[in-house]
Image (cartoon, rainbow, N blue to C red):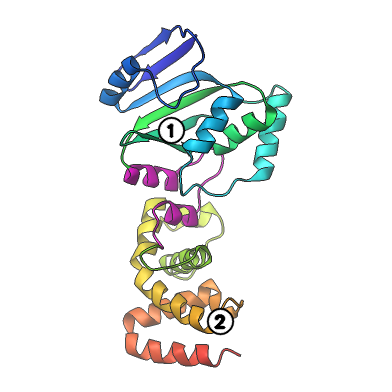
Amino acid sequence: MRTRVSAGGGGETLREKEREERGAPVAQERSLAAEARIEATVEWISPAQAREWLSHCLYERQRKLREAHVARLTAAIHNGRYAAQGITLANVEGRWVLTNGQHRLSAIVRAEREVREVVIRKWQSMEAVADEYGRTDIGVRRSLLDSMQAHDVGAEYALNPFEIKRHGAAAGLIQACFERPRGLGTWDRLGLSDPDERLLFAVEWLPEGSWYWKLLRQSLRGRTHYLQMAPVAAVAYVSRRFAPEQAEAFWSQVVAGKD
């Protein structure tokens, strides 16, 4: 038996002829869900199904797999303590994208056992997928870096993942008036707990970030240096925004005399 609850109304029970290895609902369900835009079902996920979703539906900007987390979930499956937390698939113009659940699916594959899970299917745009992925996760709060990578923020400014991470930290310092954030409590106290606001703020400072990291990239050539620290980058950002000519001359001299 499989229980289905859609956004358009209550729940109903459907008898399956077999446990389908699929990424989408059957035609009748698709019609209802297309109107409701969301569907939640309780399903048994086989290792084959998990492998299929991981192989063909993985979100292209998904962060790296945390092996320790997969190991914990695998052990929970083996000892009977696994708790369903939800797997989310988004239908983007007919293509199914896995936006939440790669660790649980990986554990199912590794454990080689069928697991009962809640599967949430949504019909939405890729922009909505990126926004949702950047803001939410089950068990782990996604970082600003995750949000920026989900939205492909650094692509336009040719920033690599290391530079995006440092840029996010520098922008966070500016937003917090140079009070170094220490956990979520700092953001809450400063009234900056909304991850969307932090993302938008970081994006607003990308022109300064692009200038600064390009300057360092040409000079450092992959070496680690104190100029890459977030507080230094934040000061450079602010100086360049409010006194661009003087800042560019000053920081060029600083970088040139880095050694």
Q: Distance between the residues labelled 2 and 1?
A: 42 Å
Task: Give the tally of numbered discs.
Answer: 2
Q: Within the image, what quadrant is residue 70 found in? A: top right
Can you tell which mark lies on residue 58? none
Residue 84 seen in this snapshot = no
Q: In this picture, is 249 found above or below 97?
A: below
SS at mark 1 in the image:
strand
Q: Which mark is residue 220?
A: 2
Quadrant of the image containing the C terminus: bottom right
Q: Say if the magenta span includes residue 14.
A: no
- Residue sitting at x 72%, y 25%: 78
Q: How crowded is mark 1: few (under 14 residues within 10 Å), some or many (20 or more)?
A: many
The magenta span reads 126-154
Return the x and y of residue 226 as percentages of the image width and height: 59, 79
**Residue 35 place in picture, x, y as percent:** 25, 24
Quarter of the image for residue 201 reads bottom left
Q: What element carries label 2?
A: helix
Q: Nearer the viewer, residue 49 or 139?
A: 49
Residue at label 1?
A: 89
* x then y, percent, for residue 230: 52, 72
